[in-house]
Image (spheres, helix red, strand yellow):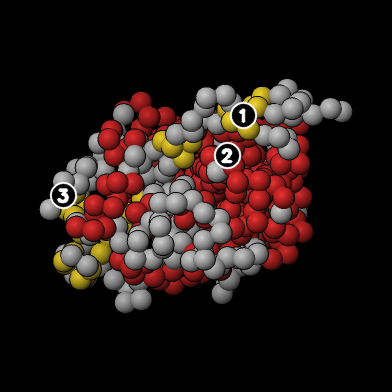
């Protein structure tokens, strides 16, 4: 058998895709000592675990991954508790709530960031735009004071550092724990106050939501808002960075998208398949489970490699190629993420913010192309992905003709 590079090695972090191929081909189920988990990499296996038709998997492992920084969130829940929580929060992220209430928030926050650099001729699409836009959108959707956006951004940075702290750096751990305390001190009084003065924002929707006589407590709402920082911030940040990196590296496809903006949904879908923001998701087995390559015992942690599954040659033709015109994506202009790739997971935890993410990315790409029509990479710059659990370019310096007026 071929040697599989360790998922925690620098070599893997630099380029995981060759390792993913070896795993899919010759080691589709591996015991990984350092993370204490079983790693799976084939599309059919990851899809099966996410869909979980037989009720064999839980998210109980999130009690040690997510709980310390966010508290108890929808991600840790299962069964009826999860179904009720999902019904409480999901309506805010689709339909008229999204289109009428939050699309204007998305458009406004994107425009404000672009206005800050469009006259300058140069920008870093990651640090000046992608890392700020989704976090500002969440803060603004929640109806928080604009003066608090900077504080929100600081918490966001601490939370994603905590979640990505593979080496267990004690300073990062301490900063994450401090953030949990600071965030609660900030949010809880706002939530209490909002209950008495309901408005048109997401926080008010969450305060008022009721399903089968169940409502969310202040603590529940605070934990959900905290989760949104990471779940809705870092992911969309990386999706925007990656869609631009992919298009800038493929000038013909970029030209086609500029010519026909109707292709942006395809570029988004292909980016999520080819370079997904979240590469790994963990589950816990409730029973003994057979997967390709062998048997996982009950109570085991399973690391599902989305980044590997999305490039499975048994699912996609020429999977390493970025191609917005590939015929094995079903997306046209309709939204069919669940049929196209595993970037939003599947099954009961399928990303509740998928349509919001799509609206943010499409708005962002459209506005950036309007404002910077000759957008190009800074001379000699070669975009590089970084990260292991989540992955994307950390910097994307670009040049353009400064906007007049
Ligand atoms: C769940 C990816 C954007 C909120 C998930 C999961 C994935 C994911 C893989 C499943 C996690 C698991 O099963 O353990 C993404 C990607 C995004 C994105 C790639 C951007 C391109 C967003 C946005 C929001 C959001 C914008 C909301 C503001 C959530 C929430 C869950 C979730 C609350 C938990 C759902 C549940 O447990 O039922 N997302 N997400 N996500 N996402 Fe997203």
Q: Residue at x 19, y 46 (%)?
A: 4
Q: Which residue is mark 1?
A: 398
Q: Residue at x 84, y 27 (%)?
A: 404
Q: Nearer the viewer, mark 2 or mark 1?
A: 2
Q: Position of residue 249 (x, y in %)?
A: 53, 39
Label pair 2/1, CB-CB below 8 angstroms:
yes
Kind of element beneath mark 3? loop
Q: Residue furthest front?
A: 252
Mark-to-mark CA distance, 1 and 3: 40 Å
Disc nearer the start of the sequence (1/3): 3
Is the residue marked by circle 1 packed among few (<14), some (14-19), or many (20+) residues within 10 Å? some
Q: Residue at x 65, y 64 (%)?
A: 333
Q: Which residue is mark 2?
A: 248
Labels in figure, total: 3
Location of residue 93 by image quarter: bottom right
Between 92 and 254, the one lying in front of the other is 254
The residue carrying mark 3 has its beta carbon less than 8 Å from ligand 1: no
Query: Horizontal placement of 355 versus 288: left or right?
Result: right
Kind of element beneath mark 1? strand
Q: Position of residue 55 (x, y in %)?
A: 32, 74
Between 187 and 364, the one lying in front of the other is 364
Q: Residue furthest right?
A: 405
Q: Is residue 41 above or below residue 133?
A: below
Query: Horizontal placement of 224 versus 93: left or right?
Result: left
Q: Which residue is mark 3?
A: 2
């Amino acid at each position: 058998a071929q040697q599989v590079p360790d998922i925690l090695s620098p070599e893997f972090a630099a380029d995981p895709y060759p390792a993913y191929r070896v795993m899919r081909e010759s080691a589709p189920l591996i015991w990984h000592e350092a993370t204490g988990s079983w790693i799976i990499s084939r599309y059919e296996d990851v899809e099966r675990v996410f869909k979980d038709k037989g009720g064999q998997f839980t998210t109980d492992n999130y009690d040690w991954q997510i709980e310390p920084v966010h508290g108890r969130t929808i991600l840790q829940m299962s069964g009826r508790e999860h179904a009720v929580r999902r019904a409480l929060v999901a309506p805010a992220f689709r339909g008229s709530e999204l289109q009428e209430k939050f699309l204007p928030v998305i458009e406004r926050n994107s425009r404000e960031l672009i206005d800050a650099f469009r006259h300058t001729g140069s920008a870093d699409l990651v640090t000046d735009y992608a890392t700020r836009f989704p976090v500002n959108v969440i803060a603004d959707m929640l109806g928080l004071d604009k003066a608090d956006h900077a504080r929100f951004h600081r918490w966001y940075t601490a939370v994603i550092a905590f979640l990505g702290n593979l080496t267990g750096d004690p300073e990062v751990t301490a900063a994450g724990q401090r953030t949990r305390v600071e965030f609660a001190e900030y949010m809880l009084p706002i939530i209490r106050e909002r209950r008495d003065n309901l408005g048109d924002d997401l926080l008010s929707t969450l305060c008022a939501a009721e399903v089968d006589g169940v409502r969310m407590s202040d603590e529940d709402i605070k934990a959900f808002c905290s989760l949104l920082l990471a779940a809705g911030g870092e992911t969309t940040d990386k999706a925007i960075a990656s869609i631009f990196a992919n298009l800038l590296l493929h000038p013909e496809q970029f030209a086609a998208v500029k010519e026909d903006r109707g292709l942006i949904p395809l570029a988004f879908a292909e980016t999520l398949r080819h370079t997904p923001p979240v590469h790994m998701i963990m589950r816990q087995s409730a029973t003994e489970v057979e997967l390709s390559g062998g048997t996982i015992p009950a109570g085991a942690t399973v690391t599902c490699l989305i980044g590997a599954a999305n490039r499975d040659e048994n699912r996609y033709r020429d999977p390493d190629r970025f191609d917005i015109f590939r015929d094995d994506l079903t997306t046209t202009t309709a939204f069919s993420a669940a049929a196209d790739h595993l970037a939003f997971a599947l099954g009961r935890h399928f990303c509740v913010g998928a349509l919001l993410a799509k609206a943010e990315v499409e708005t962002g790409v459209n506005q950036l192309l309007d404002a910077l029509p000759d957008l190009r990479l800074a001379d000699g710059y070669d975009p590089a992905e970084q990260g292991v659990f989540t992955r994307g370019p950390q910097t994307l310096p670009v040049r353009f003709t400064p906007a007049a007026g």
